[in-house]
Amino acid sequence: MRILGPSLLGGAARCAVVLLVGFCAQLAQARGPVVEVFKSATCGCCTEWVKHLRAHGFEVSARDVRDPAAYRAKFGVPERLGSCHTARVEGYAIEGHVPAREIRRLLAERPRAVGLAVPAMPRGSPGMEGSVRDPYDVLLFDAEGRTRVYASYR
């Protein structure tokens, strides 16, 4: 008596493969997109921002680089919008302490833009948490360097 014939085993194997592929796709979606971060090895707030992204479901590839400003120029971030780290996610540049919520919104809306920036290093922004909170804006910027307020934190 055969319990598992060749056709039944083949069907079971195909089913297992389909389930595994579906599970892997769901796992990739649950993790979120990969954010590549270019930062100085000595900057503690950059490390804290990376932790913020990971805590909000992003997979992060953080690289300590000698000249983070070179990546700002490479990714089209205007110098006046500069901060202490630059990142890329799904083709967008992310400059400074941009909250994970705004990055998710950017990826959902997909505006025609180069990216988002939080210029300087405002106290109270992700990675700069403490007892003092400064108001700040998250700016959406285009290839000509034009900006508009994407979100305000007060």
Image: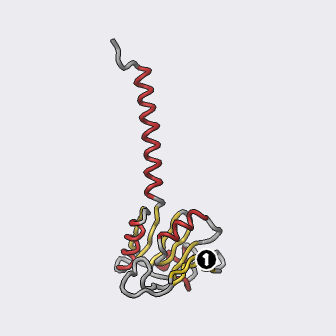
In this view, the residue in front, 31 or 41, is 31
**Where does label 1 land, which residue?**
141
Q: Quadrant of residue 149?
A: bottom right
Q: Residues within 10 Å of mark 1 (few under 14, many from 20)?
A: many
The answer to whether residue 107 is left or right of residue 5 is right
Amino acid at the residue labelled 1: Phe
- Tell me the SS state at disc 1: strand
Up/down of 26 relative to 100, above or below: above
Up/down of 48 relative to 121, above or below: above
Percent across and percent down for residue 101 are 49, 69
Percent across and percent down for residue 70 are 50, 77
Q: In the image, what residue occupies the spot 45% across and 53% down?
A: 28
Q: Quadrant of the N terminus?
A: top left
Q: In the image, what residue occupies the spot 46% across and 87% down?
A: 134
- Furthest residue in direction front, as rendered: 154
Up/down of 78 relative to 108, above or below: below
Percent across and percent down for residue 138 are 54, 78
Percent across and percent down for residue 111 are 63, 67
